[in-house]
Image: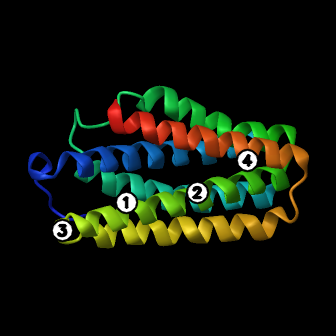
Amino acid sequence: MPPPVLDWAALPPVLRRELRASHLGEAVAVRLYDGVADATDDPDARRFARHHREVEEIHLARLRRLVPAGGESRLLAPCRAGGWLMGWLPAKVGGPRTFYAVLAAVEGWVDGHYAGQIALARRLGAPPGLVELLEACRSDESHHAGDAARLAGRPGPLARLLAAVAVACSRAGVALARRL
């Protein structure tokens, strides 16, 4: 699905802020999967990370075509580093099941975040194709959450703690990206 053709300057400021936050989130997601790949030798976890990273790269490429140079969040570099750590830490200290639990929680949160953006875009009469793009991203994130949840099993205390921290960081990142 090609991204819609948008006049960035003509978009309502609230939609520009939301797209900036989504762009940041997809950049973070790509790095999260890099962190996992750097932390584990488990072939299944590495294969999972590689496949899901490819999907996140597609999302990021589509959003890069929407968000013009200079329209990105100023937090891109530090948040990308945080994304890498968000993947590396659970995979390194807790193993693949801990990583899967963190991912299930984060991707589940992202699914809800996209749902809110879709509702907002519809209310504002978003340009053709924008809602469809957000829906496609949301569908992929929902699948990622489900895939990870199945592999995580019943998360232990460390996994639950790291998942809560990762979701809190995701919330904070989005809130800040809307402003910076």
Residue 117: mark in rendering = 1
Q: Is residue 41 something that shows in the picture?
A: no
**Residue, disc 3:** 125
Tag 2, which secondary structure? helix
Query: Which quadrant holds residue 165?
Result: top right
Indicate left or right for 152 with 80 as reference.
Answer: right
Label 4, residues with CA under 10 Å away: few <14, some 14-19, many ≥20: many
Earlier sequence position, callout 2 versus callout 1: 2
- Name the residue nearer the viewer: 56 or 20: 20
Q: Which residue is mark 4?
A: 163
Q: Residues within 10 Å of mark 1 (few under 14, many from 20)?
A: many
In the picture, measured across the screen, residue 31 lies left or right of residue 101, that is left
Q: Are marks 4 and 1 in contact (CB under 8 Å)?
A: no
Query: Which SS class for mark 4?
Result: helix
What residue is disc 2 on? 109
Q: Position of residue 10 (x, y in %)?
A: 9, 51
**Mark 3 and mark 2 in contact (Cβ < 8 Å)?**
no
Q: Earlier in the sequence, mark 4 or mark 1?
A: 1
**Residue shown at 53%/57% (left/top)?**
110
Asked whether, in this view, residue 166 is left or right of residue 134, the answer is right
Q: Are the residues flagged by discs 3 and 1 in contact, CB closer than 8 Å?
A: no
- The amino acid marked with disc number 2 is Trp
